[in-house]
């Protein structure tokens, strides 16, 4: 296993070193560490790559853009949820208002009916003495 790992590390270095030499003019500082494997570890290879400040700034900007986009999407979703909740609340209020309106209309009809009955009783009371006097 150790030979296979050594070949893998060697191939990785052969690919990285020429690229690093070309990019050295453009990059301020690049640090790369390849840790040797010992018998106690598995076939894992640990790498540490530090990029120059310019690369860090670019990465920060990309994260900010993604975070901003994600934040806007979360905000839009919250707005959609609020709209849906408000629409549901309005439907419920409208239904309650209709029920109150129906109850009020029923009360008005009952009062009108009682008023008409009272008017008939009063008319009957007024007409009864007149009929008795006319006889």
Image (cartoon, rainbow, N blue to C red):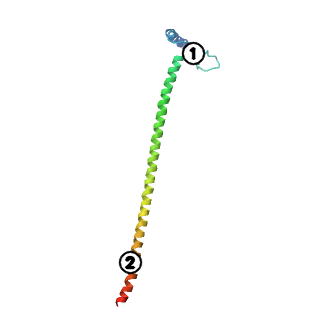
Look at 54% across and 17% down and name the residue there: 53
User: Most extreme residue toward the right, as rendered?
Assistant: 40
Q: Residues within 10 Å of mark 2 (few under 14, many from 20)?
A: few
| Residue for badge 1 | 5
Can you identify the residue that label 2 sits on?
Answer: 120
List x then y, in percent, for residue 120: 38, 77
Q: Earlier in the sequence, mark 1 or mark 2?
A: 1
Q: Nearer the viewer, mark 1 or mark 2?
A: 2
Residue 59 image offset from top left, x and y in percent: 51, 22
Image coordinates of residue 94 in percent, x first then y, are 43, 54
Residue at screen point 43% across, 66% down: 107
Q: How many marks?
A: 2
User: Which mark is on residue 29?
Assistant: none
Q: Quadrant of residue 35?
A: top right
Q: Quadrant of the N terminus?
A: top right
Label 2: state its secondary structure: helix
């Amino acid at each position: 296993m150790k030979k296979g790992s050594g070949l893998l590390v060697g191939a990785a270095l052969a690919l990285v070193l020429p690229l690093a030499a070309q990019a050295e003019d453009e990059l301020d500082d690049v640090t790369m560490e390849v840790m040797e494997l010992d018998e106690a570890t598995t076939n894992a290879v640990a790498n540490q790559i530090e990029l120059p400040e310019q690369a860090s700034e670019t990465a920060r900007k990309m994260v900010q853009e993604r975070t901003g986009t994600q934040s806007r999407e979360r905000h839009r979703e919250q707005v959609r949820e609020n709209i849906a909740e408000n629409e549901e609340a309005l439907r419920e209020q409208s239904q309650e208002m209709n029920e109150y309106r129906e109850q009020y209309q029923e009360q008005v009809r009952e009062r009108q009916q009682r008023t008409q009955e009272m008017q008939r009783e009063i008319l009957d009371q007024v007409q009864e003495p007149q009929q008795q006097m006319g006889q």
